């Protein structure tokens, strides 16, 4: 009886969490990521926000870059941002990957997972603003190098700091954004190393908005120094939150990473969206070719108070 009850409990627990988009870098390569284009939307990621150099100037994948605490992630990614990382003529430097999927990652309640660290070589510039793991509307993101942050990594909602963390070299930070797209709330889960995720802030109201193709796995920064950022254990989960780091997430659907990009005005126009950083106070449209038909999005300054 005990063994049957245990098996039933395990099966019930496994069904409560499901990976609906798998962005883990297992068995992937920079060459495979480079195969993606607007006319050939293959793989787990859209790859178009980067500099003019070779893919390996900006994205490299290796077991050396994976969070060793996560047995389900055999590989991780080193994201490099330097003085050549200008995209689309913008003055900020950027290397970013975006989920390529038809899954409803912008509906209901979802958990956006990733692990992040920095090293001592090509370390981030603590005097320049960095935006990490952000959405185009910047309703939730991590920031580093913001004035007055004392070198801490910060979780932000709508441009306001809600939680900060020491950002020491070679320490893995495990993050999950708990986003309720129906209730317009966000919760922040965090741990380091092999520790389980714990709620650190929220859930709180935010201007939650996503077209399902605008979560930026990577870094946007306002300096030209060469920096390396390490990402691992990236996935989006439906159902209950998986707090364990040792075996991240529920069962991934077969070949989930090969699904084509989400249907959106961006994909339909086959043009890259113009993404304006949250520190730029301006009214912008979401795509470069649909200015006449798209409604303008007001991008708030990170220093501007956001109404609650």
Image: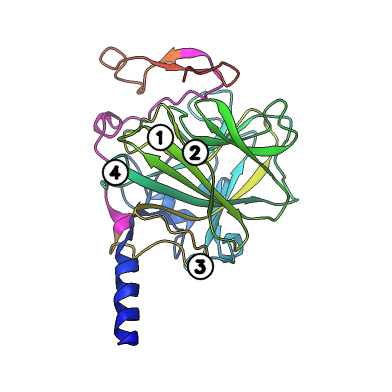
Rendered position, 87 above or below 54 = above
Among numbered discs 1 and 4, the one appearing first in the sequence: 1
Circle 1 packing at 10 Å, graded few (<14), some (14-19), many (20+), is many
Q: CA distance from mark 4 to mark 3?
A: 25 Å
Among numbered discs 1 and 2, the one appearing first in the sequence: 1
Q: Quadrant of residue 144?
A: top right
Residue 185's label in the rendered image is 1
Q: How many marks?
A: 4
Q: CA distance from mark 1 to mark 2?
A: 8 Å
User: What is the chief secondary structure element of the magenta stretch?
Assistant: loop
Tell me if residue 34 can be seen.
yes
User: Which color scheme does this rendered protein use?
Assistant: rainbow
Residues tagged 1 and 3 counted as in contact (Cβ below 8 A): no
- Is residue 7 found left or right of 163 in the rendered image? left
Q: Start and end of the magenta stretch?
A: 256-282
Q: Which residue is mark 2?
A: 202
Between residues 150 and 259, which one lies in front from this camera angle?
150
Residues tagged 1 and 2 counted as in contact (Cβ below 8 A): yes
Residues tagged 4 and 3 counted as in contact (Cβ below 8 A): no
Q: Which residue is mark 3?
A: 74
Between residues 249 and 206, which one lies in front from this camera angle?
206
Circle 2 packing at 10 Å, graded few (<14), some (14-19), many (20+), is some
* Residue 271 on the magenta segment: yes
Between tags 2 and 4, which lies in front? Answer: 2
The x and y percentages for residue 53 are 55, 41
Circle 3 packing at 10 Å, graded few (<14), some (14-19), many (20+), is some
């Amino acid at each position: 009886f005990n063994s049957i009850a245990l098996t039933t409990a395990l099966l019930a627990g496994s069904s409560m969490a499901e990976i609906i988009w798998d962005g883990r870098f297992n068995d992937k390569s920079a060459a495979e990521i480079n195969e993606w284009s607007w006319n050939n939307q293959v793989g787990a990621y859209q790859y178009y926000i980067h500099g003019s150099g070779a893919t390996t100037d900006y994205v490299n994948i290796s077991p050396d870059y994976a969070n060793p605490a996560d047995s389900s992630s055999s590989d991780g990614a080193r994201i490099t941002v330097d003085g050549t990382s200008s995209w689309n003529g913008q003055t900020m430097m950027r290397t970013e990957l975006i989920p390529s999927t038809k899954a409803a990652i912008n509906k209901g309640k979802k958990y956006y997972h990733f692990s992040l660290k920095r090293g001592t070589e090509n370390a981030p510039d603590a005097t320049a603003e960095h935006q990490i793991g952000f959405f185009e509307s910047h309703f939730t993101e991590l920031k580093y190098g913001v004035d007055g942050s004392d070198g801490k990594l910060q979780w932000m909602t709508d441009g306001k700091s809600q939680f900060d963390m020491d950002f020491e070299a070679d320490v893995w930070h495990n993050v999950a954004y708990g986003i309720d797209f129906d209730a317009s709330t966000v919760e922040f889960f965090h741990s380091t190393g092999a520790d389980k995720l714990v709620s650190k802030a929220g859930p709180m109201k935010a201007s939650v908005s996503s077209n399902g193709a605008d979560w930026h796995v990577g870094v946007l920064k306002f300096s030209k120094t060469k920096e390396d950022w390490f990402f691992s254990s990236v996935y989006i989960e439906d159902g209950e939150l998986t707090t364990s780091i040792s075996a991240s997430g529920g069962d991934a659907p077969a070949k989930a990473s090969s699904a084509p990009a989400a249907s959106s005005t961006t994909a339909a126009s086959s043009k890259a969206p113009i993404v304006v950083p949250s520190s730029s106070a301006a009214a912008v449209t979401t795509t470069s070719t649909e200015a006449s038909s798209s409604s303008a999005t007001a991008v708030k300054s990170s220093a501007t108070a956001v109404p609650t």
